[in-house]
Amino acid sequence: LKYFSNLLGAVYRQGNLNFSKDGNAVVSPVGNRVSVFDLKNNTSETLPISTTKNITCVGLSPDGNLAVVVDEDGAALLVSLITRAILHHFHFHKPVNSIRFSPDGRKFVVTKENVALMYHAPGKQREFNAFVLDKSYYGPYDETTCIDWTDDSKCFVVGSKDMSTWVYGAQRWANLIYYSLGGHKDVIVGCFFEKDSLDLYTVSQDGTLCVWESDTELDGLVLKKSRDKPKPVRQGDEEEDIEEERIEGEEGEVIRGKAETPKEKNVRYRQKSRHFFNKEGDFNNLTAAAYHKPTHILVTGFASGIFHLHELPEFNLIHSLSISDQRISSVAINSSGDWIGFGCSGMGQLLVWEWQSESYVFKQQGHFNNMAALAYSPDGQYIVTGGDDGKVKVWNTNSGLCFVTFTEHTSSVTNVTFTSSGFVIVSASLDGTVRAFDLHRYRNFRTFTSPRPAQFSCLSVDVSGELVSAGAQDSFEIFLWSMQTGRLLEVLGGHEGPVSCLCFSPVQSILASASWDRTIRLWDMLDSWQVKETLPLTSDGMSVTYRPDGQELAVATLNGEISFWNPHTATQTGSVSGRHDLEMGRKETDKITAKQSAKGKSFKSLCYSADGESILAGGQSKFVCIYNVKEQMLMKKFEISCNLSFDAMEEFLDRRKMTEFGSLDLVDEGAGDGDGVNISLPGVRKGDMSSRHFKPEIRVSSLRFSPTGRSWAATTTEGLLVYSLDGSLVFDPYDLDLDVTPASIRKQLRLQEWASAIVLAFRLNEKALKQEVLETVPHDQIPVVCGSLPDIYVEKLLGFVAACLEKSGHLQFYMTWAQNLLMLHGQKLKNRFTFVMSILPTLQALQKSIKRHFDDLSKLCDFNMYNIRYAEALSKQRGVKRAAEEDKDEEEEEDEELSEEMSEPK
Ligand SMILES: *[C@@H]1O[C@H](CO)[C@@H](O)[C@H](O)[C@H]1NC(C)=O
Ligand SMILES: *[C@@H]1O[C@H](CO)[C@@H](O)[C@H](O)[C@H]1NC(C)=O
Ligand SMILES: *[C@@H]1O[C@H](CO)[C@@H](O)[C@H](O)[C@H]1NC(C)=O
Ligand SMILES: *[C@@H]1O[C@H](CO)[C@@H](O)[C@H](O)[C@H]1NC(C)=O
Ligand SMILES: *[C@@H]1O[C@H](CO)[C@@H](O)[C@H](O)[C@H]1NC(C)=O
Ligand SMILES: *[C@@H]1O[C@H](CO)[C@@H](O)[C@H](O)[C@H]1NC(C)=O
Ligand SMILES: *[C@@H]1O[C@H](CO)[C@@H](O)[C@H](O)[C@H]1NC(C)=O
Ligand SMILES: CC(=O)N[C@H]1CO[C@H](CO)[C@@H](O)[C@@H]1O
């Protein structure tokens, strides 16, 4: 079973940021998913939920257990942040601008069109309908934009695009039903109550702040008397209901409310002061604002990427900084007020700034455009990605965070790879350079170029890491350089079309190249780079890859086929037709149906699994397919996105968009040329950037299996998606007999028949039981047990130990297992080559987790060493000082010092 595990490469797109309840994590909407970045542990996680369109707002309940996620259309999900499960689906039917829970957690308000709707917050248990409408509040003439609650949840305030702000009572207050505040000349961006007060601040887009003072305290609010016979509280979430409420609300409730209370004094507001932000330019609109009540700090973000920190109500400027050249679209402050999160949708940036120390706590940015390529490091710890923005980024697979970005390329990066040492990254780009980067010093230490400038569309590095080859898109040539000297060694000519893919054999010095000229050529280094074989293809070659043992080649062609070849005899051994499996969605501008448009679609990227038995294929489609090579059969198909905001997702035409002139998206208003319809050329990948409606088309640019064999990653228009293989959920007994039951296994344990208990537990293949059995084995028995284990269980046990080592606290215990298994069986494993191929991922997984523990421990040890040295030095110093002091006979001071010493850090 494979499941979605993380989304890397994109940290923020649009919508509001917020901090988790403990204030250590930022919750950020990324397209149609939600990611949580833990700033203390340096980890990221993408919730296993997704909406159909891009998310516009996320509301978190004050206890931090629930989130309401709303997309562009108003489709909402109620998500439990504890179980990470979707509890409920709901549709608001119209776009929602913001959503806020009341501080007591009992209600939440959403702003939709010109209404504010108050709902009962969903209860703890699953209810039939979690979204129960309580009241609708009308008044503004234009869209409502922002919300804030008073601390005691008695009232809330709503800002609107019509430049007005409305204070509403959340309950039936006699002296406050609604209050409308004017005074701004632009759209309201933020409105905030002062702490424990009805006093207000409002901020508008033109950079104006108004301070409002109310003549009543919060406890001055009076409940409406029961003889006023309140209207029955309306419930329901149907559109008709709201319409009805609307009429009554405006003419009945609100106006009557005012007239009915002649004796009581209504809450009144007075504009106390008005301030103007220094915007540095007329077009620099104020775009986002957040207020931290306990510290009275207002944070405002501007279209130019500048933010200001002001102390209210005095409006003292504390700080101002430019953090981006893009519009700041969201601001959030953590509960202690120390960390400020900023989201910039233009560049997909997410930043967290600690204002007191004036430093970044977190600064991440996805690839600005599409990602084109990815590669795993040999130990599976890192992923490198290259993007159309020319950037090369390296990500840590454990934390999901990018830790270095290389910006030397000036045009799209077309392929990236690690060399076998794991510390050098090589990238090819359309800017005419191939660059090598050093991961120790984080620098570009070699740049390879061709005599005449060429656009490099593909790249491959041989197993030794010494030969670098790149293929040109325009001159049809292949260039070979030496990594050591940086010199051009060879130019291989012969292809009659652009070279689309290169791949070195993992076992020989042979380079395979695929070209649009419908051939695969195999170049032999030992034969001074002559063409050894030419494999004729039925269609343009898109991708070529060697099986990990080098004994087979897989080739993807433009007609949607994957063919398999024996590289020694140059004969085709099989083929798979993938066209049907690609099953393209229909582009809005396609005049043909989905089935027709599947013609001309093909796989662009292939990757063998480590054992060479299956192959992963993806291309210009939302599907990634896994084929069994031997059976030439589709094993599984993954849908990588359900995001309808991408083009080519709807398999059938939306009838509502059809007009008598064809699809609405095809009708280009005012374009007088011809029929005004642009249909992209077949094979054009990126769409016409200059056309008016540009929607990114969903596609997979690159696919890789992790060297540990436990996950695979794909670069797609959505970002970098990582899928995990998790065996623990599958019931996959090896050869189950009747007497294999948990009871019989535990019986063997009691009899101290360790090896047979292990064999039985692995037959039943239940994770908890395997762990129980393994951890029951006494420490000193491990070598004996390992020695008596049948061969076929060695690999399984090793894999299990590797998985446990990753998470378990019993570090030494599992290390002992791993060491004994390898010491006692290593030689046997080595002698069986094919077995080594299949066990390789297990070994790599083991190495990966050992390496991680090693890094953690060595840091800790260093830290302890420094502390011990510090303590030692300190005590010496004290000794000298005390000797001097004893002479002076000052006992009191000595006492003080002693107690001070006690509290020194250990
Ligand atoms: C808020 O940010 C500060 C940063 O200094 C951090 O120490 C704190 O744990 C965070 N959370 C809360 C609840 O204060
Ligand atoms: C972060 O680390 C703390 C303490 O080490 C731990 O309690 C917490 O669960 C960790 N959070 C995550 C998300 O791993
Ligand atoms: C997280 O990253 C920050 C900054 O890079 C670093 O100071 C901190 O020690 C890291 N925390 C952990 C738990 O690795
Ligand atoms: C949804 O997200 C995609 C990917 O970032 C973006 O290109 C698209 O414009 C978004 N859709 C809307 C309507 O903003
Ligand atoms: C942010 O999250 C907290 C709960 O962690 C919630 O009380 C608060 O209302 C949220 N703020 C916004 C602006 O959504
Ligand atoms: C700033 O706001 C004005 C008024 O709403 C709007 O017309 C203008 O386009 C905005 N400018 C920018 C740069 O967003
Ligand atoms: C990208 O690089 C990898 C690693 O060298 C290679 O296997 C793959 O074929 C290359 N892809 C292209 C399109 O050149
Ligand atoms: C309409 C559609 O395909 N929606 C899907 C969006 O993604 C989630 C999870 O991936 C699916 O469950 C939905 O069906």
Image (cartoon, rainbow, N blue to C red):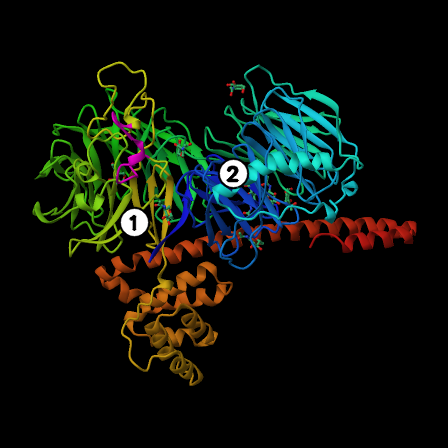
Q: In which quarter of the image is residue 274?
A: top right
Residue bearing the label numbered 2: 243
Q: Quadrant of residue 295?
A: top right
Q: Is residue 636 shown in magenta?
A: no
SS at circle 1? strand
Please state the total of marks drawn on the protein image.
2
Q: In this view, does 888 lie above or below 471?
A: below
Q: What stretch is highlighted in magenta?
A: 647-663
Residue topped by disc 1 = 638
Of the pair 807 and 440, the residue shown nearer to us:
807
Give residue 839's position: percent from left, percent from top: 29, 60
Q: How crowded is mark 1: few (under 14 residues within 10 Å), some or many (20 or more)?
A: few
Q: Residue furthest right?
A: 889
Residue 348 relative to residue 309: left or right: left
Whether residue 652 is in magenta: the answer is yes
Classify the position of ligand 4 by quadrant: top left, top right, bottom left or bottom right. Answer: top left
Sequence-first tag of 1 and 2: 2
Q: Separation of disc 1 and disc 2 at Cα?
A: 43 Å
Q: Which of marks 1 and 2 is in front?
A: 2
At mark 2, the secondary structure is: helix
Query: Can residue 484 be seen in this snapshot?
Result: no
- In the image, what residue type sits under mark 2? Glu
Q: Are marks 1 and 2 in contact (CB under 8 Å)?
A: no
The x and y percentages for residue 406 are 42, 31
Identified by mark 1, the residue type is Phe
